[in-house]
Amino acid sequence: MPIETLEQRLKAQAQQLGFAACRIADADAAPQSAARLRQWLDAGHHGDMLWMEERAHQRGSPRGLWPDVRSVIMLGMSYAPGRDPLALAGAPDRARFSVYAQGKDYHDVVKKALKALARWLVEQQAREGEAGGLKVFVDTAPVMEKPLAQGAGLGWQGKHSNLVSRDHGSWLFLGAIYTERALTPDGPERDHCGSCTACQAACPTDAFPAPYVVDARRCISYLTIEHKGPIPEALREGIGNRVYGCDDCLAVCPWNKFADHAAANKAFIGRAELAAPAIGDLLDLDDATFREIFSGSPIKRIGRNRMVRNAAIAAGNSGDPRLLARLQALVGDEDPVVAEAATWAIGKLSA
């Protein structure tokens, strides 16, 4: 039997640590990323995510962030949902949370596994008398994970701009390990979207000015999570009952029918209390209760005020006059953005 290569052992170890996919790319595997990022930023599609602009020089390529990197190990951890993400579309009195946020915070889960894999790789290199630094990244650093994942063969960037995998559909959290060591690359994945436009048609706020391009300023995920100010009134009706993120463009992708749900990491199983909470209950949140409920969840990062703002808009879209009293209590909220959203919702329900 032939001796397993380091790359083969690496992939086996990644699987043991909970990763559903592991592939390798050269550091220059996504040469068009910098130009495409610049075009996207110049169009203003990043909205008020100013950090995208400020670190664009590092984000454009792996070597822009770390000049010594030679290979990029791209990893995917599955969070394929156990239930239909669109099931609550017809329940306007219930709040919808994006699938990825209903379990444990993926930043913590993925980074822990990445660090364990990096330690293993350092040990392997030491046994072979090799050296080489490593850096691990999960979403919070200026790394173009999706183009690099396509360059490594994990999947391809679909027309919704997210990664699509033939084995895991649209449900992969991505992590990266940059290494100074030259590893054998796996080669890129080609685009398999074909003529399908399901994701484009599904967007309730028309956030796609063109296939493969998302305008964050119209995207519900951006509006409910990243955006701190009042949500533009023209987009509020399209938000429906979504209070944190949106799965519509991901959920309708035909490739999801091939997703390996058995590969989903158990840490991301949705918490029962986030499956279909009443919008009215979210309107009542104070800061302490918000922190208690969303402890250990990625949702905690938006804070109570943005959550209640989102819930107020969902209440206005609900058509349920029973929520008027709870909304009235928010008209004098200390946060003027919350107060404005509540006033708008009252007007909508009273019309």
Image: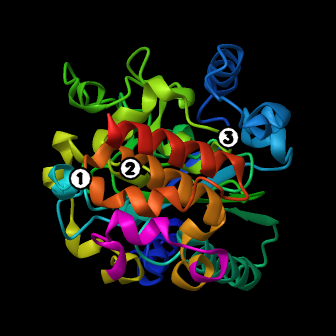
Question: Which quarter of the figure has residue 341?
Answer: top right
Residue annotated with mark 1: 92
- Name which residue lies at 33% across and 78% down: 269
Quadrant of the image for the C terminus? top left
Q: Are the two marked residues, 2 and 3, in contact with CB atoms closer than 8 angstroms?
A: no
Give neighbour class at mark 3: few <14, some 14-19, many 20+ (Cα, 10 Å).
Answer: some
Start-end of magenta stretch: 273-289
Tell me which residue sits at (59%, 32%) in the image: 30
Residue 314: mark: 2
Q: Secondary structure at mark 1?
A: loop
Residue 122 is left or right of residue 242, and the answer is right
* Badge 1 amino acid: Pro
Image height of 311 relative to 109, above or below: above
Judge the density around disc 1: few (<14), some (14-19), many (≥20) Cα neighbours within 10 Å. many
178 up-or-down from 147: above or below: below
Q: At label 2, which amino acid type do we have?
A: Ala
Disc 2 and disc 1: Cα gap in Å? 8 Å
Left or right position of 283 against 132: left
Determine if residue 74 is in view: no
User: Magenta span has 66?
Assistant: no
Amino acid at circle 3: Gly
Q: Earlier in the sequence, mark 2 or mark 1?
A: 1
